[in-house]
Image: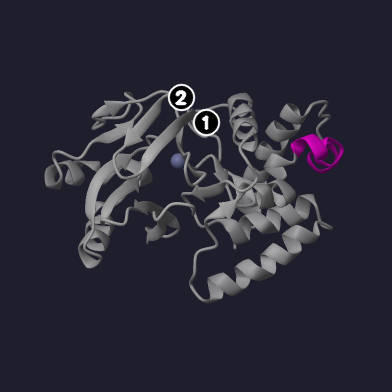
Amino acid sequence: MKTPLRLVPVPMFNDNYLWLLIAANGNTIAVDVGDYDVLAHYLQAHDLTLTTVLITHHHRDHIAGLVDLKKNHPNVPIYGSASISGITHALDGGNIINIPHFGRFLVLDISGHTKIHLAFYHFADKVLFCSDCLFSAGCGRIFDGDALSFYHSIQKISLLADDTILCPAHEYTLSNLQFSLAVEPNNQDSKDYQQQCLLLRQQHRPTLPTLLGKEKRLNPFLRCHLLVKEISALTQQSCQTSAQGFAALRRYKNDWQSSNLL
Ligand SMILES: [Zn+2]
């Protein structure tokens, strides 16, 4: 982080993170509010003032806390897609917002997990709140989105600088790494990262945030252009392009997960 801002993942539910960006004066941005009580408790315990909420997509574990949030903070602006109930400031991909004490954010349309999914990129610190699009060593499932949009969204993220700090919304890294190593058994970066993450999780510490450059070395969903042949063999699909490889790999992981749950 180049600015005095602090980035904090607050655990929520079983494996979600509520991401907070905190300014030196205690002003705080919350990204997605699945559980208002978790947010309220953290703000009170650390003497912070909620000044802005950013919402990425419509799933319950990202917005269920908005009703209570609005009751308790009626004047806090809530940025997100106009399709989500409770949003006070509607956004689309390509918009830029300027938040006092924090600076400028670029809004990215990263649909695919859902039909509408926004990400927020903080220019000064190169932080991307990518929620359920890109996870460490994996990516989100496809719900009401589609594979081709998802592929393009991940391509869009990959155009950011390698030192971009990625903030996914779930602690799925260890189970994702099992899958990554099934796709690329000899990927030394994945093997080394798995050891680091095992230690972190033993200490109940988050494996996140992660870095885009690292993800490019080990996340198979960012590496489809390098793995078309391997993905074709693994999924027994004849993939010709990296977009087809992405779609086949995403489908394959749906079934793989169900038989390999940790
Ligand atoms: Zn979701």
Q: Residue at x 67, y 57 (%)?
A: 177
How far across and how far down the image is residue 180, in percent? 72, 52
Q: Which residue is mark 1?
A: 110
Magenta stretch in the rendered image: 224-235
Q: Residue at x 72, y 28 (%)?
A: 243
Query: Could you tell me if residue 261 is visible in this image?
Result: no
Against 250, residue 191 (above or below) is below
**194 or 229: nearer the viewer:** 194
Quadrant in which the C terminus is drawn? bottom right
| Dot 1 or dot 2, earlier in sequence | 2
Specify the amino acid type for callout 1.
Ile
**215 or 246: nearer the viewer:** 215
Q: Quadrant of residue 100?
A: top left
**56 or 91: nearer the viewer:** 91
Q: Residue at x 57, y 46 (%)?
A: 164
**46 or 40: nearer the viewer:** 46
Specify the amino acid type for callout 2.
Gly
Work out how far the residue at label 1 is from the one at label 2, CA to CA, in angstroms: 8 Å
- Say left or right for 2 vs 80: right
Majority SS type along the magenta span:
helix
Q: Which residue is mark 2?
A: 93
Question: What is the number of the mark on residue 206?
Answer: none
Against 204, residue 2 (above or below) is above
Residue at the outermost front position = 3
